[in-house]
Image (spheres, coloured by chain):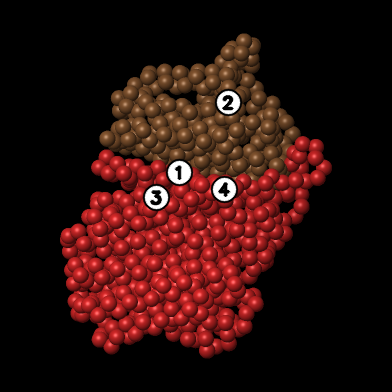
Amino acid sequence: MTWIWIVLAPLLGGLIYGGERVLRARMQRRQGPPLLQPFYDMFKLLDKRTLILHAPHALLAVAHFFVLWFTVAAIFLGWNLIYIIFLHLFAQILLILAGYSVRSVYSHLGANRELLMVVAYEPVLILVAVGFYLISGSFEITTILQGDGYWHQLPLLFVALLIIVPIKVKKSPFDIGEAHQEIVGGIEIEYSGVFYEFLYMSRFLEYLFIYSFVFLFGGESYWLGAVLVAGVFLLVNLVDNATARVHAADMVKIVYGFAMSFAIINILGVLL
Amino acid sequence: MLTLILLPIIASVFTLLLPFKRVHYFITASVLVTLTLVAFSFYSSTEIVTFHLSHSMSFLIVAADVILLLYFLYQGIKFRSANVIFLSAVQLLLYGYVESIAPTGGPAEIVVDNLSKFMFLIINGVGGIIVLYSVRYMRDEPVSATKKSLFIAGLLLFLSIMNLIVCANSILLFFLLFEMTTLASYLLISFRNDTLSRANGLKALWMNQIGGVVILLGALVAIEGYGTVMFDTLLKSSGGMVLFTVALLAMSALVKGAALPFEGWLLGAMVAPTPVSAMLHSATMVKIAPYLILKLAPVLGATLLGSLLSVTGALVFVAASYLALSRFVFKEILGYSTVALLGLMMALAAIGTKESMTLAMVLMLFHALSKALLFLAAGVLEKQYHVKNIEEMKGLVHRAPKTVGFILFGFISLTLPPFGLFMGKLLAITSISSLLRERPALLIVVLSLVIGSALLVLLYFKVSSALLSAPSDILPTQKEHLPYGFSIPLILLAFYSIATAAGFIIIQGDLFIAWLALPLLLVILLPSMVQKMERYDRIQPYHCGEKELFDAALVYYEPSIRVRQIIYGGFGMLFVAVAFIGVLS
């Protein structure tokens, strides 16, 4: 059963992404694209003539996608949370190396920002994992999911996670990684055709990755987890529609100033 | 045991006698092979070897100490360095007093325990490779042939000093060897003999002499309190004075490990020829710091002093990673990241549980391998391409694909799964988290660990951004000619990193960890797919309609002067606090 979910992960992520576009359109009182638009996009991209800059650059995007898929698979299989975070880091580094491997200003700027994003959210993710560990006594997802709900014991960690979700799903106010108006998509700009499709699908997997952290706060009650995910999903999109993008350096300051302090206070609260 | 100490000395005599030619490759290579084999056989044996020093040898040690200190004094007077003169004088007086009241006899002066055997592996395996590399490196150095031979001989001698220091059981013997490594860094840093080298050499000298002074004070307290100068007797005794001695000794570790605020001497050392940086400041000498803390760790345990030391080390990890982001000289960046990781090793060692101590050792080994690789690659860039700072490295991958490949490998082995350093950090997070309930102060260590690691990722891949950025592959890539003298040491180090990482995974016996290596397989397979990419058309990158090609600038993060003052002031206070807490407990 789990294996079927793993194989279908990109499709699942694609549905979430499509659903999100519909939701955002409704929030803005637009008609918006159909739910299956990401898949229509896929057929269109596969049909396009593929132009590449050089082979390693194109292949790194493919590697990024597969490592990310592997990460999501690890989540479904209930592995150690810390391993999963570092696997995800590996995937990000591949993408960043891809961004740096071409002599393109926008790609470089995008990769710089991706790095900053890693610096911002990575410590918070690990602290969230440490929080789970302190309550459940294990880093394994299977064990964490047997606990009875975490959000009342780790409320501030949940808020900290909430702050970094927009970074990962590239939503305002933290959508600095692609920032279409400023750096025309960052790393994405130099990709086309089938290789862009890989990057596009990576985004679906990112959704699964970050929302599964939200899901974990539900513990053994999968319903609670689902409600939390739905709530965060709504909230993130609401905030996305209501805010403007912050400066890249300010993002780090906000995350370190607020998310980190919340996380530390919460962990100290659990410890003392 | 004697092979490890005597062989480098004999080899250094040979290097001096024979003309600087190919024969040096032969000598250094055979030294490398022999030492590595001996170190391995030592490591696999379980017996603990002890040695008593004869009376005449003890006398020789005293004589050597006095001569050494007088030499420092002379250098201080010669180059008019008030710090050096003052500290040498203090050391001479203290040493005279300590030696006059030091008890004779007692347990063996030299003890080879498991920790020493582990250090032998690092010192001889990595150090030997660096010596081999330095033969090719020195060939192009604009100095006389005698001086070249002298340089190689110096490095070889240094190996034997290092081999001895990790099995010294007497604090006074340790002091002599500690001072000898100080001497080695002083001589090797000022090797090029220009104003800058001289100034940095003197800086290294006086900073390390502070370490010498606190070791002597530690010996003094040990003699007054327990009538012994032996580590093992001291660590077995109980009472408040033990912690005071340990605090003083740990302070010397902080100095030797270039923990802030003493990182100045290590960075200054970057003016020296690259093998020196690799040998002294990454692979071997600075490892004395975590080694010493590991040796003292059994008494540190859950004490306040232990917590303070681990917090200090952890904060050094973050602060040094942050300060590195403002640097643009490649070797300085590597230097700062060494300071940072040494801080982390000391932090883990000072926690004092069995697990964290093992992790500190793991980090030491893998750090030595990766950092030596990076420094040696930096040396290649310097010699073959004449680039030293990262601004000049733009697009270097096009000109020097092999060397850049090694550097990237070094960065990846420092940050990503399944390599050792990553594994160490990962297990450290798990291990410290399990201690958090009993010792909440360790939360600072966890925090520093995660923030510092993230900052180091930023640092390393910022540097890669300069190295990479190749034009589209319509142009043929140039073939890079890498001389064997350079490539063999690099390949050896890379091979060691992979082999030890694989070994470490197997030892863990955790199947999940092995899975972590899987993504890497994907990356290794990538180059073979490059051939199949011919069928796609190539384009030029998007430049928004600009005709002139322009590049994105590198990013630097410079702390303001006030922040800098706070950082240095804070670490100065922490350093003093170590002694203070030592007195109190």
3 and 2 marks on the same chain: no
Residue identifier under label 3: B314
Is disc 3 in contact with disc 1, using a CB cutoff of under 8 Å?
Answer: no
Q: Nearer the viewer, residue A250 or B42?
A: A250
As drawn, the label of residue A172 is 2
Residue at 34% of width from left, 21% of height from top?
A: A221
Chain drawn red, letter?
B
Q: Nearer the viewer, residue A146 or A210?
A: A210
As drawn, the label of residue A245 is none
4 and 2 marks on the same chain: no
How much space separates mark 2 and mark 1, taking CA atoms?
24 Å
As drawn, the label of residue B451 is 1
How much space separates mark 4 and mark 1, taking CA atoms?
17 Å
User: Quarter-wise, where is residue B104 in the image?
Assistant: bottom left
| Residue type (three-letter) at the residue carrying disc 2 | Ser
Residue identifier under label 4: B558
Q: Is residue A55 above or below residue A49?
A: below
Residue at 49% of width from left, 68% of height from top?
A: B203
Chain for disc number 1: B
User: Quarter-wise, where is residue A240 in the image?
Assistant: top right
Chain for disc number 3: B
Q: Secondary structure at mark 4?
A: loop
| Residue type (three-letter) at the residue carrying disc 1 | Ile
Earlier along the polypeptide chain: callout 3 or callout 1?
A: 3
Earlier along the polypeptide chain: callout 4 or callout 1?
A: 1
Q: Check the rendered structure and report the hue given to chain A.
A: brown
